[in-house]
Amino acid sequence: MAEVQGVGEGMRSIAVTAIAIVILVVMASFCVPTGRTVPFGWSSTYTGEEMVLNFTIGQTPHSKDITVLLQNTDRLWDGRAGILLDDAPWISEELDNGSAPSQVQGLYDHLVSELDKWSSVTEVSIVHLDDLDRFLASGASTLVIANDLRGDASISSKVKAWVENGGLLVAVGNHSIPFSYQSADEMHELGGSGPVLSYHHVEYNGGTGVTSSPFAEAYSLQYFAPYAAISIDDVERNNGTVIGYEYGGALATIASIPYGEGGILAFGGSMGPAFQVNGPDVVAADLVRLLMGGAAFSTSEPIFQNIVMGQDGGKGTLSVRIPARGDIQAVAFSNDRHNTLLWGYVLLDLLAN
């Protein structure tokens, strides 16, 4: 059994041995924003095949709704992402032509702002089509597409190969995965190959029939009423995971799909105007949580606790099974959207990777 203790400020790198496996305890590439810190103490204990995290949260003058979360993940986000901006004329969302350029630009602006709340060391850029080859060769881990680019075979093959070699494609809206198909018949007719993912129009209707997945609940996701959602049957046929909300148990607002050495994080519908439940601000906020918390590369459902704390502080315990490979990421964040990250550590980095 090994135990590691610390507080949620400063940079640390601690090596321990547990169960004949070398385990690294290091702070992730983000830290608590100066001046907005909530004191956070923790100790982690490793017994058998389980890791137990005990945490304490210091006093705050005002009540805060806080989530503390453990996530098994097969990789850590490297903080580098590009958002593809198609310079071609855009007609109308009614023609299912993807998100408007202004919304794509808004996604970039909000993504940068959200990452700043996490005080993270990141590199996010706008990628024009002329720069796509350079971006794909740059080693960046994440590409965001919110346009319909299926008609360009060259782009489709390049992005597909990049994902197969380990890239993460964040696809916002129907047809934003250049190498996917709505049906097996469409794939066979076009003579292509790729995941079959069908999208269907949805109506929120006050939340009737809408339920939270474990990820949506743990990460307090806001993207619950898009224009369209993804067939859960198709997600499961592609060995994927429902990340967002479910409509009638048949459609998912967000899904994670493994593909080759990489994967796809698919958001159901194209973006609407800002400050709506499907706007670029909401997509950016949810995307940052899923990237920084490890859900985009998850290997199991998150373990979490929600705590309402104030002048008396708070404390709790979480336990998670130690995976054979990959990482365990621990994150604590407030749910007020103003002081997002309180604490973030990579608790386990198994050298079996």
Image (cartoon, rainbow, N blue to C red):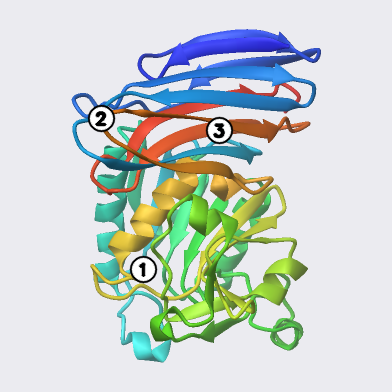
State which mark lies toward you, 2 or 3: 2
Which residue is at the front of the view, 72 or 335?
335
Residue of label 3: 329
First along the sequence among labels 2 and 3? 2
Task: Indicate the secondary structure of the residue bearing disc 2.
Answer: loop
Residue of label 1: 86
Which three-letter amino acid code belongs to the residue tagged 2?
Answer: Gln
Q: Residue at x 48, y 24 (%)?
A: 55
Per the model, the C-alpha gap separating discs 2 and 3 is 28 Å
Which three-letter amino acid code belongs to the residue tagged 1?
Answer: Asp
Seen in the picture, residue 283 relative to 271 is either above or below; the reply is above
First along the sequence among labels 1 and 3? 1
Q: Which mark is residue 311?
A: 2
First along the sequence among labels 2 and 1? 1
Seen in the picture, residue 104 relative to 93 is either above or below; the reply is above
Which three-letter amino acid code belongs to the residue tagged 3?
Answer: Gln
Residue 353, how many percent across, how many down?
Answer: 72, 28
Q: Quadrant of residue 50?
A: top right
- Tell whether label 3 touches label 2 (CB within 8 Å): no
- Judged left or right of residue 21, residue 161 is left
Task: Indicate the secondary structure of the residue bearing disc 1.
Answer: loop
Per the model, the C-alpha gap separating discs 2 and 1 is 50 Å
Residue 109, how many percent across, how many down?
Answer: 24, 54
Q: Residue at x 31, y 27 (%)?
A: 32
- Judged left or right of residue 250, residue 68 is left
